[in-house]
Image (cartoon, rainbow, N blue to C red):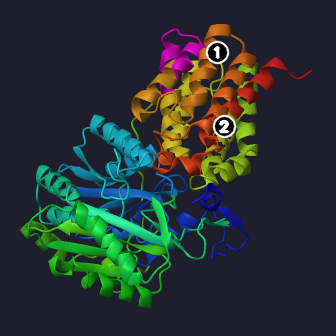
Amino acid sequence: MDRERRVPIMTSTNKRFINDKHSLVTEALDGMVALGGGNALARLDGYPHIKVVTRAQLDPSKVAVISGGGAGHEPAHAGFVGRGLLSAAVCGEVFASPSVEAVYAGIMAVTGDAGCVLIVKNYTGDRLNFGLAAERARAQGKRVQTVLIADDIAIPGSAQPRGVAGTLFVHKIAGHLAEQGADLDVVADAAQAAAGEIWSLGVSLETCSIPGQPAPTRLASDETELGLGIHGEPGVETIPIQPVGSIVALIVDRLAASLPTGDHRYAALINNLGAVPPIEMSLIAHEILRSKLGPALELVIGPAPLMTSLDMNGFSLSLLRLDELRRAALSSACAPAAWRAPVVPAPALELRPLPAKPARDAVAPSSNDRVERGLAALLHRLVDMQAELDALDAKIGDGDTGSTFATAARAIQARAGQLPYARPDQLLAALGEILGEAMGGSSGVLMSIFCTAAGQAYGRGLGWAAAASEGVARIQDYGGARLGDRTMIDALVPGFAALIASGDLSQAAAAAREGAERTANMPLAKAGRAAYLSAPVLAGVPDPGAVAVAAAFEAVRDALTNPPA
């Protein structure tokens, strides 16, 4: 297929029943919590940056089970909070990982002496945010174990398979064992073992449309997309549209090739990705049951919207190899409405206080004209570029890079008068904390790591450029990206290297811009969400994060080399 047909074509039709895209997730969560009925729910009082739904009543003697991720997958994840399933769900904005601060708040709110299990889908942002939050919670004495889900078989031989709808099997198994009073090791080991024996694959007739953005399409009217992601990522391949029996047979063949040999029994989860009508989902289930895998299917969950992708017109099939423990866990009663009929709404919304944060030394605001001008210019540039970066990201991702950076910039602008500009080490630490709370996604946690590490380096006596370079090194350590991997590292590394070598902001900005432009000619990404995309999709499109970094260098250069009269 030629590349032009795979590049999203923006149309004007994207009607939504929403008030404002910025408040969509918080308002929807409040509605869900209020309708919890007998499955009484609460949320932490931390809107808008901390969106955590918990059970209203928790038993601290039992292991807590926590999951989460970006919104847009409803009823996952918050819809599965309740007795016999999750203790809490940590929610991000649409298709964006929740912040480290939000995950940490969720852990501290529901974890007692028995400890907790974090169930994390295999995406860079989720791994980083949940992982750093787990480390922080362990530092406060909490017992935390993490289970990583990587059930998507769409990309054969992938080093980082995605976590998709099969995650729900693990929610149920861990929740069942925790409800039975099993200890932390038993719950975590069973969950991890199950995660290793789940296989999932999805197909769609059309991708999803994100609230507040033009509706995209990349498929012709006679095409179907196989092996796509739950965030609207392009599929592994396109196939001609055909009778659903033929599509199901193809999915079954791909799944069967991944299954272990032998006479095993399986549970099937038939998942509506958002917009498939019920009559078609029933037909899909019919075809699955009469496929060659049908005789091996002992338990079937669905067909139902369980882990959706907004309004995606597609479905996925997940298989779990059964044993006695898993049979019992999947069949046990649980409270969440996503698994049961509707119930009477709760009479009132219960708010729970945020867990107390560790005490921190107070930092007094201070002034430094040069630092203030440079930071203000950088923030202003990122806010101005929101639409441009979103449009660029929409060509290869979910179209939120500009919104992510602009949200972070606005959060810093809101606290600009409280920052210690005369103390760079304290300033960088403060910026790292703000980014960790407000930015979300993998970019947010990486930039938080950058600021935190750079601040510590400055405090040890390094200058601005050298300290920033140490921050970049920590990003590479934690995020795994290297120069040439088609990420923002391709602008950060040459920019700060030029600054150290020359001390000249103009040379640094030029090097960062050159690095960003080089990403357009890199055939494959080796880190981040773009790593799941093929070379034709990426061709000619620079990495949006690298473009944002280059613009930030240029904004600081313009502000400091051309000061106001």
Q: Main secondary structure of the magenta part?
A: helix
Kind of element beneath mark 2: helix
Q: Amino acid at mark 1?
A: Ala
Q: Is residue 403 above or below residue 39?
A: above
* Stretch in magenta: 452-469
Across and down, in percent, residue 456 comes to 48, 19
Residue 213 in view in this figure = no
**What residue would you read off at disc 1?**
498
Q: Amino acid at mark 2?
A: Val
What label sits on residue 514 in the rendered view?
none
Q: Is residue 415 above or below residue 280?
A: above
Kind of element beneath mark 1: helix
Residue 64 in view in this figure = yes
Label 1 vs 2, first from the N-terminus: 1
* Quadrant for the C terminus in the image: top right
| Residue under the image location 28 percent in, 66 percent down | 255
**What residue would you read off at disc 2?**
547
Q: Determine the image quadrant of residue 182.
A: bottom left
Across and down, in percent, residue 496 comes to 60, 19
Across and down, in percent, residue 352 comes to 41, 60
- Closer to us: 335 or 326: 326
| Residue under the image location 53 percent in, 10 percent down | 462
Q: Determine the image quadrant of residue 373.
A: top right
Q: Residues within 10 Å of mark 2 (few under 14, many from 20)?
A: many
Marks 1/2: CA–CA distance: 17 Å
- Closer to us: 86 or 399: 399
